[in-house]
Image: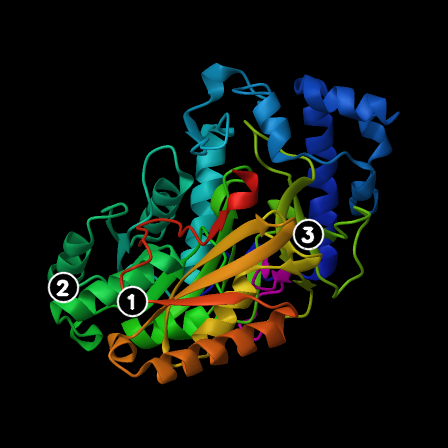
């Protein structure tokens, strides 16, 4: 299903013309309404008239999460506060939260892109969608909620947590779709198994998963355990919230709604635009937002952009599933390691559970990596030799993928703390 064929199936030439026009208007708006951007552009010797289209995008300054924190709370807003009808914010667990604002038109645009997203995932007016993202200052819950109402679906706004109630409502309300983090989906599947609830007894057919990176192997695990189609949705509060991009039923990259959000990828070392088809850090410029327009926001997410036409008929650029975040990257003894690499290896092994924890430490001036892995109960009743064999198997598999030696610790099921939101995968003791 295509929600808005006009914008989702535009020719590349039409999209470029639209983006050029909207980009120029947006640059002028931030120059005259946001002192932070005016100063940045003046420092580069630029005026709005110097930007004539997409080819000038690399001339514009970047925006980072730190810039939002430095201008806390409303320093980057481009509209008067009386025009701001909604405020969201990050949790701010590592300092000041990042604050985002929305005008009425921003809320309407947000609802539109989420409506497109849900339609791409096969969700329509006849569906009942259980939203298990958090509500409140987090953008996930309300973002999906408004888009679901826009397409006319029945919304079940349960929010995150309360797993037993989640399962009860899946049964009693006959939810056909669910939106939550992938790590919580696995926890939900585990709880269903313990309660004796079989996936085939539910009406559930599709899940919308986002808010944290997840691998193809985790997708297979979720689809197998819940008996559904697992769709990847992408968003971040600074750009709009959920609905920046989503996979269609082809599951071959996430369609970016580029009439609102212009994507680029850059090389992390030089910050120059990466070659088409090469992986880089994803950068977004918003061109229709009113309250908080953003120039070249560095997401820290790593991906590749694909410009070929999808089999679903949409012509919008697609981003490959993010391989990780540049700020999630661990450097262990000079080697770049992403948690997603370890997750992918572990999920290929039948003996391990999809729950793991990485403990990074420094001993005698040498970085160490210990991987805690949950395994089935049956292995703990086996002989020590078999446990040792499994440990060695995991060590060898990880070393082959990562290129460095790691220590593996097998732990019993439920040893690693479960999360009803974003999973905590890494404890880096080097920073403590």
Residue 419 is situated, as x and y percent measured from the top left of the image, at: 32, 51
Residue 30: image quadrant is top right
Residue 153 location in percent, x, y?
Answer: 28, 55
Q: Please indicate, yes or no, whether residue 10 appears anywhere in the rendered image.
A: no
* Local secondary structure at mark 3: strand
Q: Which of 119 and 96 is in front in this view?
A: 96
Of pointers 1 and 2, the one earlier in the residue sequence: 2
SS for dot 1: loop
**Residue at coordinates 44% horizontally, 74% vertically from top-left?**
347
- Give the number of the mark in front: 1 or 2: 1
Residue 281: mark = 3
- The residue depicted at 83 percent of the width and 21 percent of the height is 42
305 to 56, vertically: above or below: below
Task: Name the magenta segment's main secondary structure.
Answer: loop
| Residue behind mark 1 | 412
Q: Which quadrant is the N terminus positioned in? A: bottom left
Residue at the image position 62 percent from the left and 30 percent from the top: 66
Residue 172: quarter of image: bottom left
Q: What stretch is highlighted in magenta?
A: 311-324
Helix, strand or loop for disc 2: helix
Question: Which of labels 3 and 2 is toward the front?
Answer: 3
- In this rendering, the label closer to the viewer, 3 or 1: 1
Q: Residue under label 2, please give it.
A: 171
Quote the CA–CA distance across marks 3 and 1. 37 Å
How many other residues sit within 10 Å of disc 3, few (<14), some (14-19) or many (≥20)?
A: many
Q: Position of residue 279 (x, y in %)?
A: 71, 61
Residue 398 circle label: none
């Amino acid at each position: 299903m295509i929600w808005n064929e006009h914008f989702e199936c535009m020719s590349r030439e039409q999209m470029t013309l639209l983006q050029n026009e909207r980009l120029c208007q947006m640059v002028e708006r931030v120059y005259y309404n946001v002192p932070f951007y005016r100063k940045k552009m003046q420092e580069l010797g630029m005026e709005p008239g110097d930007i004539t289209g997409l080819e000038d995008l690399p001339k514009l300054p970047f925006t980072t999460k730190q810039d939002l924190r430095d201008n806390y709370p409303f320093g980057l807003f481009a509209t008067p506060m009386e025009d701001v009808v909604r405020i969201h914010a990050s949790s701010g667990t590592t300092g000041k939260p990042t604050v985002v604002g929305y005008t009425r038109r921003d809320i309407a645009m947000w609802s539109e892109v989420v409506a497109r997203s849900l339609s791409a995932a096969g969700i329509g007016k006849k569906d009942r969608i259980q939203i298990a993202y958090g509500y409140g200052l987090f953008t996930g819950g309300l973002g999906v909620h408004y888009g679901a109402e826009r397409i006319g679906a029945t919304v079940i706004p349960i929010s995150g947590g309360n797993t037993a109630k989640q399962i009860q409502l899946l049964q009693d309300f006959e939810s056909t779709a669910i939106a939550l983090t992938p790590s919580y989906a696995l926890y939900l599947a585990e709880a269903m198994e313990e309660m004796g609830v079989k996936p085939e007894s539910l009406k559930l057919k599709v899940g919308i998963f986002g808010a944290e990176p997840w691998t193809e192997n985790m997708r297979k695990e979720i689809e197998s355990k819940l008996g559904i189609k697992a769709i990847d949705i992408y968003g971040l509060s600074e750009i709009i919230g959920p609905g920046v991009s989503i996979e269609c039923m082809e599951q071959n990259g996430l369609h970016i709604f580029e009439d609102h959000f212009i994507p680029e990828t850059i090389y992390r070392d030089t910050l120059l635009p990466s070659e088409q088809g090469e992986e880089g850090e994803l950068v977004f410029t918003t061109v229709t937002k009113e309250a908080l327009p953003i120039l070249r926001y560095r997401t820290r997410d790593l991906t590749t952009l694909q410009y070929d036409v999808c089999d679903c008929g949409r012509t919008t650029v697609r981003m490959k599933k993010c391989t990780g975040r540049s700020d999630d990257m661990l450097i262990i003894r000079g080697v770049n390691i992403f948690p997603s690499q370890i997750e992918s290896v572990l999920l290929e092994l039948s003996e391990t559970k999809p729950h793991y924890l990485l403990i990074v430490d420094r001993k005698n001036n040498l970085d160490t990596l210990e991987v805690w892995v949950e395994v089935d109960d049956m292995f703990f009743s086996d002989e020590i030799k078999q446990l040792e064999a499994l440990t060695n198997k995991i060590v060898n598999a990880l070393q082959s993928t990562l290129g460095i030696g790691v220590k593996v610790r097998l732990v019993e099921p439920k040893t690693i703390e479960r999360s009803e939101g974003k999973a905590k995968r890494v404890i880096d003791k080097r920073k403590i």
